Amino acid sequence: MLEVTVFFTLIAVLLLIVYLVISRNTIYDAEGFETHYLASCPSGYNHSYTADGDVLCCDGQIMANKCLGDKQCILNGKGTATLPNCIDLLKQEYEQKATTWCPSSLPQYFEDREKQIKGCTSGPLNSTMNAPKTTTQPQCHVYADFNKNRVAKDSCYNVTLLDSTPCFGQNCTKELIQPVPGVPPLLAIGFTDGMGMHRIAYTRESLANFLDVVNPRWKDQGIDLEKSINVAEVAKAFYVDKTRNQSQVQF
């Protein structure tokens, strides 16, 4: 009977140790609910150990147990001003990058350094903070070079342009469309004019980028984006504001 008691006592102690280790690596919000948990260093970070056995994470090489990178954090336990907890470090880093890369509709930045994926989403992140929490969340991507950001329909660059483009007319909608793969997408604005007719026009920048690829000689052919009815601001002036007449528009 004594052996059984000792056995269950040992099991209880082991469970307590596991709980304490997990709780030290977990960040809780103000209500006490678990938000994020890192079982290992953030993606792309190397690790080392302190004399107390705590895990340190470094964004560069480690030599003689010293971090040679720009950032270092502690994986488990509370951080300090000079050695922040890794979750707090990632949150601060993501907030800074979000102001540069993320559109207003997808304000939460994330990245997976191992897979070389960067992007933004509108919902929460997964527990390791390297991807959206669910695969159904809307997201955009930050690509390595400007041309890819300009061409990819799902780039945060193009979604930012979409967010910042104003709507006009009745029943207005706006979307990115890509009729030709590998060509910069068109930013289309749909609206209903005063006669109840549905119209579609495109931002000047997206139409110019599109034509530069599919019809490089468009300027020589007399297409004038200052007057083209296919340009959103021209369509708005003609159909909605009535500030242009037919002689001032190119159909």
Image (spheres, helix red, strand yellow):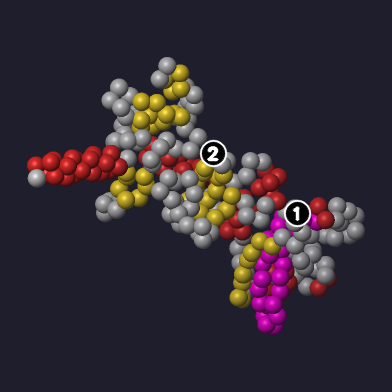
Q: What is the secondary structure assignment of the residue under circle 1?
A: loop
Amino acid bearing label 2: Glu
The residue that appears at 20% across and 43% down in the rendered structure is 11
The residue that appears at 52% across and 51% down in the rendered structure is 120
The stretch of residues the image draws in magenta is 185-212
Distance between mark 2 and mark 1 Cα atoms: 29 Å
Which one is nearer the viewer's eye here, 103 or 84?
84
Q: Residues within 10 Å of mark 1 (few under 14, many from 20)?
A: some
The residue that appears at 51% across and 57% down in the rendered structure is 135
Q: Is residue 135 above or below residue 46?
A: below
Which one is nearer the viewer's eye here, 242 or 200?
200
Q: Which residue in the rendered view is the most extreme toward the top?
A: 64
Residue 32: percent from left, percent from top: 26, 52
Q: What is the secondary structure assignment of the residue under circle 2?
A: loop
Residue 9: percent from left, percent from top: 15, 42
Q: Indicate yes or no whether the magenta region holds residue 4.
A: no
Which residue position is annotated with label 1?
183
Q: Report which quarter residue 211 is drawn in.
A: bottom right
**Residue 81 seen in the current view:** no
Q: Which residue in the rendered view is the most extreme toward the bottom?
A: 195
Q: Report which quarter residue 198 is drawn in.
A: bottom right
Q: Which mark is residue 114?
A: 2
Residue 246: percent from left, percent from top: 81, 73
Amino acid bearing label 1: Val
Where, quadrant-wise, is the N terminus in this rendering?
top left
Residue 138: percent from left, percent from top: 53, 59
